[in-house]
Image: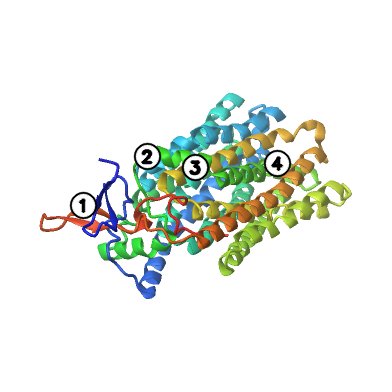
Amino acid sequence: MDSPTYYNEKDEKHVAALVTTRQVDTAAELSAGADVSPEDAARIRRKIDKHILPLMCILYWIQFMDKTTLGSAAILGIKKTAHLSTNQYNWLGTIFYLSYLLFEYPQNLALQRFPVGKWMSLNIFTWAIALCAHSACKSFAGLLVCRLLLGMCEGSITAGFLIVSSMFYTRTEQTRRVGYWFLMNGTAQIISGFISFGSLHIHTPGFMPWQWLMIITGFLTLATAVAYWFFFPDSPTNAWFLTKEERVIAVNRIKVNQTGVENKHFKIDQVYEALLDPKTWLFAAFAAFDNVPNSLTNQRAIIVNSFGFTTLQTTLLGCVDGIVEIVTIFTGVQLASRYKNAVAWVGIVYFFPNILGCFLVNFLPWKDKVGLLFSIWLTGVGTTGFVLALSWVSQVTAGHTKRVTTNAIMLSAYCIGNAAGPFMWQAKYTPRNHVPWIIIGICYLICPCLLFIIRTILKAENKRRDNDTTEDTYDDVYMSRVDEDGNTIEMKVDRAFLDLTDRENKEFRYVL
């Protein structure tokens, strides 16, 4: 039975509800009657950080490096070897995100249905094979298939990480952790730059430097897949590195989130709520506009090369892009975590350098190659805004099915922006590329406006809830369980573990 059974107590003033295990969070049983001291909570957080944060950081470095190998390969000879036209090269960037888009919601449903760590490891293994297969491709069609497989598999990673972050960390902790694993994109740019530089010096008959780049990154990905299968946990309720008592603490310390851990059962009413929630579509619009400029990922090396830098200089200068991203994301998440309700404000401020960079790259003299290079670097600062939005959407969405649906919609919009972006870069706009840069500038103007609108709506809802009288609909909810002696007992379930949505749970307050 999936619906609650209600009954009146003797005084007929109080209503209680019986629920099934299908309705409640998987952590409901572990949460019963446990209090967590600040010392224990901090100890468990450090243990969680030690065991899962390094793996998350490594994988995010790997996945970003893998999907940007196309940009690095562009100056290592892939266009010549595969006889790619400008439009075909752009399509290789687009097909990745179209595939990501097509498989994003199925990936999110699979992440809800199957163990998160195991599902991600299978996807990592598949894309490692696809990445290595790039080296055997000598035509546009072959590369197109490989890029399609990469996009299909990567759809599980960011969505999986958002779910894992909300499972293991409190809302105040999530902002920094999401920032930590996302800034590995910058680390990937640095390491990828050195790998590309090294690949350029590998001279073997019949095997080009770009092919070595694919093989090297593919084997690194394969090793990561193996590590994930054996070491990445699926949930705090069964994490291998936590004792039974520590799992109870891990579950109860995130009670403050009012979002629970997970629920393996699909709830169609939560899908409808996600679709009808205005903030879902505002976050989606933000993701789309913010990622149209992300087409720079595959164009940056070509653009910097066109400024007059040599191929060797271009590969090494790509490392600076990574440093900019690391520094800006790290400082951004620190500020957003340090100051209460500052997520939106920090995201907005970090878009200003992007807007300035777009202005400068359009109007600086073409001979000022150093100034143009610094303008390109300025446009990397605003990545912080997207990182904060990723952590923010998880913090303001409750109900497991609603959360995976909202994540899927936002990441699908992310794909749409990324898929549309490459078509701005047409040969007729070179070398100044004024049209693409103007479009990018407009996107960077829209994004902070959307963050401000989301914050305004959520602030108004928090104020309305603060003024409402306390509601007790979910104060007395029980579920049946069998104790160690085989007796069936009724256990009270905290509303934080009832798998309620943020709209259903009036105790839920939105992070701003």
Which residue, given by chain and number where applicable, does mark 2 sit on? 266
- Residue at screen point 57% across, 42% down: 67
Residue 150, horizontal then vertical, whole percent: 52, 36
> Relative to residue 125, is residue 191 depicted above or below?
below
Residue at point 48%, 46% (across, down): 159
Write down the residue under mark 3. 274
- Closest to the camera, between mark 3 and mark 2, is 3
Kindly identify which residue carries mark 1: 480
Structural distance between the alpha carbons of marks 3 and 4: 35 Å
The amino acid at mark 1 is Ser
Q: CA distance from mark 3 to mark 2?
A: 13 Å
Q: Examine the image and state in which quarter residue 44 appears.
A: bottom left
**Foreground of the two, 74 or 348:** 348
Spatial separation of the CA atoms under disc 4 and disc 1: 58 Å
Of mark 1 and mark 2, the one earlier in the sequence is 2
Asked whether the beta carbons under mark 3 and mark 4 sit within 8 Å of each other, the answer is no
What amino acid is labelled 3 in the image? Ala
- In space, the residues marked 1 and 3 are separated at their CA atoms by 30 Å
- Identify residue type, mark 2: Phe
Please tell me in which quadrant of the rendered image residue 13 appears: bottom left
Provide residue 332's location: percent of width, then percent of height: 62, 62
Residue 408, compared with residue 245, is above or below; it is above
What separation in Å lies between label 2 and label 4 (alpha carbons)? 40 Å
Closer to the camera in the image, 133 or 452: 452
- State the SS at label 3: helix
Q: 376 and 138: which one is in front?
A: 376
Residue under label 4, please give it. 299
| The furthest residue to the front | 12
Cα separation, mark 1 vs mark 2, equals 21 Å
SS state under label 4: helix
